[in-house]
Amino acid sequence: MNTVEIIRKKREGDELTSEEIQFLIRGYAKGEIPDYQMSAWTMAVYFQGMTPRETADLTMEMVRSGDQVDLSPIRGVKVDKHSTGGVGDTTTLVLAPLVAAAGVPVAKLSGRGLGHTGGTIDKLESFPGFDTSLTTEAFIRQVNDLGVAVMGQTADLTPADKQLYALRDVTASVESIPLIASSIMSKKIAAGADGIVLDVKTGSGAFMKEEEQAVQLAQAMVEIGTRVGRRTMAVISDMNQPLGRAVGNALEVKEAIDTLRGQGPPDLTELCLVLGAQMVTLAGGATDEEGARELLREKMADGTALDYLRRFVEAQGGDASVLDDPGQLPAAEVKIEVTAPAAGVVDALDAEAIGLCAMQLGAGRATKDASIDHGVGIVLHKKVGDRVQQGELLAELHAADRQQAEKVEKRLLQAISLGDQPVESPPLIRALVTESGIQKR
């Protein structure tokens, strides 16, 4: 085969064969196809797109480029959850023990945060001693014994995707639905789950700012999963304001504990029930979404879900006494109250800007190698639609030093918009996307 002809074919909008995609990805992974040719191909895809069959073929070639986790020794149907990233997105910390408590095994590979979006591994490491560097054997054994385990992604998972993403990042071809979808789904498929529930965010704090884009991405990913034999569905959820009230690693852990006690923020609780119900239903743990929701509510109410979190933390070396005394979590040296400059109604919270404020405090990473401070972050006391009086508390900054906090305070106030007219909070759940189509909510 000829690489130039494959590039030309895609440039003209023609469909590539499975063999041509295989030739391209394997050749690039081996170093036989140079960056300049691969970047030409990704730009052709950016403008011409790919068919569902091409996208599924691309996904599976990236899966085959590295290790694949075999979860078959784990009893039951394994369902994974993936979020496209947001601010205050604490769902995994709630969902992993909650869904396990409902009898569905949760075997999850997670990553660290980068930029204004937080990472599950960073949040879990807020528990003193928590270890995510499990061997695959220990990971599988823990899921069989306890029902839940989370470990860091291995370096050898989808190496071709890592190469391709790095190239896209420096050639302005990241924003391509087929390339995004195949990148996400290759990692989920390589991680070995039988079913995949996708939380596709849309809004100011999400990668997909427009709902139409988010739906297109969800459809592409569901199509890939279905074509390769994985039970797959997606939830389109709002990220025009942070999820819950806490933004920052240890602060979000405390919020997750509160949520499992049935005392969490309404939006975080609702999203966890929606995603959890889909996970339980895909795994066959309930016949329908309503039955699954009721089961999850029961596990929250009777303390079973919180007990699963306790056992999960202990199993991975963490100090579970934190659940009874969250004051043991990492904490910031300085706390500053951010108050309203005038009376009004909160009509917008710029989620991305708030995430960047938390990153500036040290809760996130500007580069992959940067260190983070688990104790810093932001706690919001008002959300969109809430009325506020002049001088009333809007948010609380948790910072390493006062000078840093004062710099971020000005930036945070710019991210909070006050108006004089009543507004409704944006709908949390926009749609469900399944192989049968789109269900608007």
Image (cartoon, grey):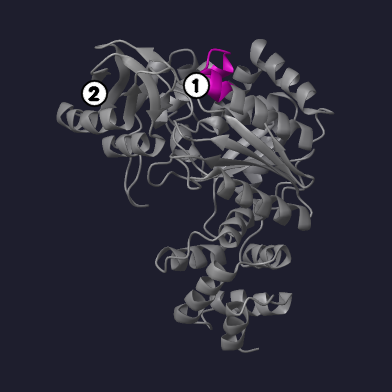
Q: Residues within 10 Å of mark 2 (few under 14, many from 20)?
A: few
Q: Answer with the quarter of the image where residue 79 lies.
A: top right
Which structural element holds mark 2?
A: loop
- Name the residue type under label 2: Glu
Residue 355 image point, x, y percent: 37, 37
How crowded pointer 1 is (Cα within 10 Å; few <14, some 14-19, many 20+) is rated as: few
Asked whether 234 or 342 is in front, the reply is 342
Residue 47 in sight here: yes
The reply, left or right, for residue 297 in relation to residue 173 is: right
Which residue is at 52% across, 58% downward?
A: 155
Magenta part of the chain: 259-269
Cα distance in 3D space between marks 1 and 2: 36 Å
Badge nearest the viewer, 1 or 2: 1
Considering only vertical position in the picture, is 189 above or below 422?
Answer: below
> Is residue 265 inside the magenta stretch?
yes
Q: Up-down: is 310 above or below 262?
A: below
Q: Which amino acid is tagged 1?
A: Glu
In the depicted structure, whether residue 176 falls above or below residue 300: below
Q: How many numbered callouts?
A: 2
* Secondary structure of residue under mark 1: loop
Q: Is residue 270 magenta?
A: no
- For residue 140, side relative to residue 266 (left or right): right
Give x and y (percent) for residue 328. Answer: 38, 19
Dot 1 or dot 2, earlier in sequence: 2
Left or right position of 63 against 123: right
Is any atom of residue 376 visible in this view?
A: no
**At 62% across and 51% down in the image, what residue appears?**
216
Q: In the rendered image, which quarter contains the N terminus?
A: bottom right
Residue beneath disc 2: 333
Name the outermost residue toward the right: 287
Location of residue 178 (image quadrant): bottom right
Please give the residue where the numbered disc 1 appears in the rendered image.
Answer: 424
